[in-house]
């Protein structure tokens, strides 16, 4: 028995040591990327960047808690670039002092002022719209976000959890437009219109429309491209055939967009590479990949929107600044709980 | 034979006091509780206005839903788990040998995967309803469709089907080694087998059922993927919302700790309820009961009773995954990254499992050999991590781990002038710590339940014969609870493989496991691409299940 337990400990120790041997140091021509963006979506861009610059990109995909991780690592953090899929998280990173301001003509000349931080703390890389999917047999070509709460849609709307950051951002923008009282009324109305519990993901909206569970739904624009392209398999192409994407607008504004954005980490050990990476991501080449591989709207006006998405009309981003909506994020998420959106 | 004079205990007072065991137990408990302590500190940063909002808008519904879900899953796992465990132990019927291990298979399926799979299968545009419509002559789902599984009942059934093996595993181990004598006595006294189950076996198995059910319920409580996907609103999403949407980490920690207090109270209540019961039989060699041979309709019903949960909890989703994986492979091939991911997954899970088992043994033995407030507190405290949602626990661990890493890095830098990088977060050691903290409950609980079957008279006898407590541990406790230890190891390993939130948050750069790969795809809605990873988790999970079943059989 004693023998056995010694062996036991031996194996454990040696395996642990093997793991420790992999401890990352800081090497030249490397770049460490912390991202909340799903690896499958970002990988094509990383590969292209490595190919054109020779810089190796190490990544870690963190779903939630990117700020906490960087805080915990403090000034020893290996993070160079922090990339998030939600403007709210990005602003949060800046407010917690985890980013640094950078100056880059390449970035400021390409990205419109509304899609970057005034002081150079963050930059948008791509946009997506909070869209409406409508059953193709429905005679509907335009709709406002406000109309989603109209009683005519009672029992006909599908949407994911009201607490999901996508929907929290939408409600935040609604508050920015109409104030809290009106937003609460709207959210209550939308809740009353639900055909099924507010759950699942965005693509379930398309499938549920196909299954006649609902007539319209709210989901992100790029999923339509992903489904239609066949990248997700033939079944999803079928789901996409059942829907038409509409780019809704606010009554006195445009379409609610959210961004994927990035910032250079405050203690970035490879700052130069980090800036280079950001500049690459908004270059014509990378923006074209964004548009083609992810079906997102590019921030660089030189890049074209993928035809699978472009066919639904030109995007007119909302007049209210993204950061304005972010300010109401907390109120929006509490509101979703107040009206029992997910219950 | 040693006499009283040569009893080493007389010469080594520290051994008698068990200082080593006690110290070990306390150290482990402290380490395991580190994230919880750090959560308490975070919670104390204060969160103004959270609770009035929670009380008014969240708690009533969330509590109601949580209670219904827990009650439903609890009933389902206890029913399925104990019935099947009794069937394969007390009866012999065609297929029993396969069922013995096959009943464990659903364990390998992550709960959110079963939710995704069943929504695919049972969706109005899916295969089942399509066939039904064809059969009944309807052309569109508008005319005919089944109730949506995205509901409370759907969630209860799906979670029950994947989580019952926790009860099956612990209860079967109990039936195997414990019940034989008593069952035979009651049979001799004229009791029928059915009433033996009700009156003897079931009450005897209570500690095992309690352990298994509480593991299943804590999994339920912490499950976020499946229940959120199915639209059941429990307390856990509110924790996330406070944190993610409102950047109110202290508030999130407060909700998580409040949940933890409730769980602890429930566990204490259950222990209190059976405080006066003893579960060890007299000191005799535990024997395995000889199963009664069934035939005819009895055999058929026993067969179907066992087949049913396996079919729904494993075979159906596994076939679905196989089909999806096959489509994917013929469509896009297998990514070469998957091999690294397999190695990563197995390595981290195996290291963590060994560590957790070792610590569990120390805790359980300290609590048994040196009963007292300290050791029992240590054993209980070590189970706290399991009752906190995975992400929250990981956040709690992040701060002490980060603190250590920075301290270490500064120290090395001062000494050598080179920046060494982060020791724990950069190496994967933080993952092992997280898994240990999270799954220590499984190990301690399982091993304690195993120990509880060993009659104390054996300990006394061994001590009188001159064994030290460590000697008793080696020659009595360890060999007699091999099955329980192996079961605990299996549960921990499979759980580590499936673990997601802590893995996402605490892993090093470029370190993917099967679970994170799976999640990355699921998060972007492309779970069909994740089918291969999901299938691999299931397949690798099966290996230890088979090993374990052999272990049980050799003993039998």
Image: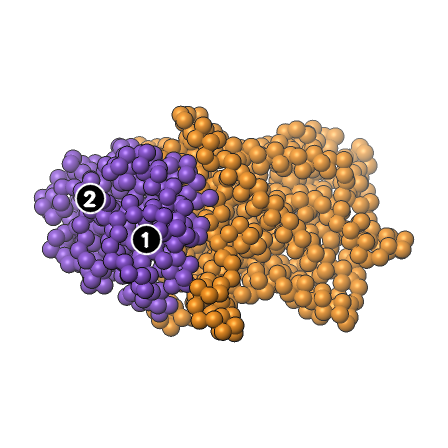
Chain colours: A purple, B orange
- Sequence-first tag of 1 and 2: 1
At label 2, counting other C-alpha atoms closer than 10 Å, the crowd grade (few under 14, some 14-19, many 20 or more) is: some
Provide residue B235's location: percent of width, then percent of height. Answer: 49, 39
The residue drawn where x is 20% and y is 62% is A311
Q: How many numbered dots are placed on residues in this image?
A: 2
The residue drawn where x is 47% and y is 36% is B58
Q: Residue furthest right?
A: B189
The residue drawn where x is 73% and y is 33% is B9
Q: Is residue A204 left or right of residue B550?
A: left
Provide residue B163's location: percent of width, then percent of height. Answer: 58, 53
Mark 2 lies on a secondary structure that is loop
Q: Nearer the viewer, residue A168 or B79?
A: A168
Q: Is residue A323 left or right of residue B492?
A: left
Q: Nearer the viewer, residue A7 or B488?
A: B488
Compared with B119, B170 (above or below) is above
Q: Is residue A83 left or right of residue B151?
A: left
Q: Which mark is residue A219?
A: 1
Residue B220 in view, yes or no: yes
Q: Residue furthest front?
A: A152
Residue matched to label 2: A253
């Amino acid at each position: 028995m004693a023998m056995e337990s010694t062996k036991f400990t031996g194996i454990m120790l040696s395996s642990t040591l093997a793991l420790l041997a992999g401890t990352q140091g800081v090497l030249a021509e490397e770049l460490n990327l912390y991202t909340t963006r799903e690896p499958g979506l970002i990988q094509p861009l990383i590969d292209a960047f490595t190919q054109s610059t020779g810089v190796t990109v190490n990544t870690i995909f963190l779903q939630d808690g990117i700020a906490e991780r960087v805080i915990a690592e403090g000034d020893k953090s290996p993070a160079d670039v922090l990339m998030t899929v939600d403007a709210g998280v990005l602003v949060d990173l800046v407010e917690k002092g985890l980013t640094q301001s950078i100056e880059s003509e390449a970035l400021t000349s390409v990205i419109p002022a509304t899609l970057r931080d005034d002081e150079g703390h963050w930059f948008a890389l791509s946009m997506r719209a909070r869209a409406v999917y409508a059953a193709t047999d429905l005679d509907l070509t335009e709709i406002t976000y406000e109309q989603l709460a109209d009683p005519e849609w009672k029992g006909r709307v599908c949407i994911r959890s009201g607490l999901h950051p996508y929907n929290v951002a939408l409600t935040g923008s609604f508050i920015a437009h109409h104030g809290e009282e009106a937003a609460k009324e709207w959210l209550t109305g939308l809740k009353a219109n639900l055909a099924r519990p507010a759950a699942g993901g965005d693509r379930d909206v398309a499938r549920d429309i196909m299954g006649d569970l609902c007539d319209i739904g709210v989901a992100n624009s790029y999923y339509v491209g992903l489904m239609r392209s066949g990248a997700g398999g033939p079944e999803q192409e079928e789901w996409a055939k059942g829907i038409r994407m509409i780019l809704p607008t606010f009554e006195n504004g445009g379409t609610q967009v959210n961004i994927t954005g990035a910032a250079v980490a405050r203690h970035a050990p490879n700052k130069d590479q980090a800036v280079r990476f950001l500049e690459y991501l908004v270059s014509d080449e990378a923006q074209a990949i964004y548009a083609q591989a992810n079906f997102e709207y590019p921030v660089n006006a030189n890049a074209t929107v993928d035809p699978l998405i472009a066919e639904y009309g030109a995007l007119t981003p909302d007049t209210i600044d993204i950061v304005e909506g972010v300010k109401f994020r907390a109120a929006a998420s509490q509101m979703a709980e107040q009206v029992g959106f997910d219950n | 034979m040693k006499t009283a004079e040569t009893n080493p205990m007389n010469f080594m007072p520290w051994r008698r006091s068990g200082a080593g065991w006690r110290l070990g137990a306390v150290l482990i408990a402290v380490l395991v509780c580190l994230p919880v302590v750090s959560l308490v500190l975070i919670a104390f940063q204060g969160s103004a206005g959270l609770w009035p909002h929670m009380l008014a808008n969240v708690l009533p519904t969330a509590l109601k839903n949580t209670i219904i879900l827990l009650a439903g899953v609890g009933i389902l796992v206890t029913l399925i788990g104990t019935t099947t465990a009794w069937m394969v132990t007390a009866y012999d019927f065609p297929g029993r040998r396969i069922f013995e291990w096959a009943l464990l298979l659903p364990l390998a399926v992550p709960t959110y995967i079963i939710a995704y799979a069943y929504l695919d299968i049972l969706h109005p545009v899916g295969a089942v309803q399509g066939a039904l419509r064809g059969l009944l002559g309807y052309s569109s789902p508008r005319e005919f469709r089944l109730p949506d599984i995205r509901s409370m009942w759907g969630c209860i059934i799906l979670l029950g089907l994947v989580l019952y093996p926790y009860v099956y595993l612990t209860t079967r181990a109990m039936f195997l080694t414990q019940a034989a004598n008593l069952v035979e006595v009651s049979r001799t006294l004229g009791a029928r087998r059915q009433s033996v189950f009700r009156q003897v076996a079931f009450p005897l198995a209570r500690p095992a059922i309690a352990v298994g059910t509480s593991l299943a319920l804590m999994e339920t409580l912490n499950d976020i993927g499946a229940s959120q996907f199915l639209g059941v609103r429990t307390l856990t999403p509110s924790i996330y919302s406070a944190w993610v949407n409102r950047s109110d980490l202290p508030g999130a920690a407060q909700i998580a700790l409040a949940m933890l207090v409730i769980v602890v109270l429930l566990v204490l209540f259950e222990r209190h309820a059976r405080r006066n019961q003893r579960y060890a039989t007299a000191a005799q060699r535990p024997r395995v009961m000889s199963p009664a041979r069934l035939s005819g309709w009895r055999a058929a019903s026993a067969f179907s009773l066992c087949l049913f949960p396996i079919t729904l909890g494993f075979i159906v989703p596994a076939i679905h995954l196989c089909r999806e994986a096959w489509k994917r492979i013929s469509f896009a091939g297998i990514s070469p990254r998957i091999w690294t991911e397999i190695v990563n997954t197995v390595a981290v899970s195996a290291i963590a499992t060994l560590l957790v088992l070792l610590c569990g043994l120390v805790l359980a033995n300290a609590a048994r050999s040196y009963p007292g407030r300290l050791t029992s507190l240590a054993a209980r405290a070590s189970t706290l991590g399991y009752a906190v949602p995975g992400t929250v626990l990981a956040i709690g661990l992040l701060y002490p781990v980060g603190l250590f890493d920075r301290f270490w890095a500064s120290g090395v830098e001062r000494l050598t002038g080179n920046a060494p990088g982060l020791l724990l977060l950069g190496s994967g050691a933080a993952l092992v710590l997280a898994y240990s903290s999270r799954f220590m409950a499984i190990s301690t609980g399982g091993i304690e339940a195993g120990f509880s079957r060993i009659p104390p008279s054996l300990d006394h006898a061994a001590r009188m014969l001159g064994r030290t407590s460590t000697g008793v541990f080696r020659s009595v406790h360890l060999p007699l609870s091999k099955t329980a230890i192996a079961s605990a190891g299996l549960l921990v390993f499979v759980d580590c493989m499936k673990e997601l939130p802590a893995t996402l948050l605490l892993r090093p750069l470029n370190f993917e496991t099967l679970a994170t790969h799976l999640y990355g795809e699921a998060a972007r809605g492309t779970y069909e691409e994740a089918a291969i990873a999901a299938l691999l988790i299931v397949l690798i999970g099966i290996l230890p299940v088979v090993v374990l079943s052999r272990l049980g059989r050799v003993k039998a």
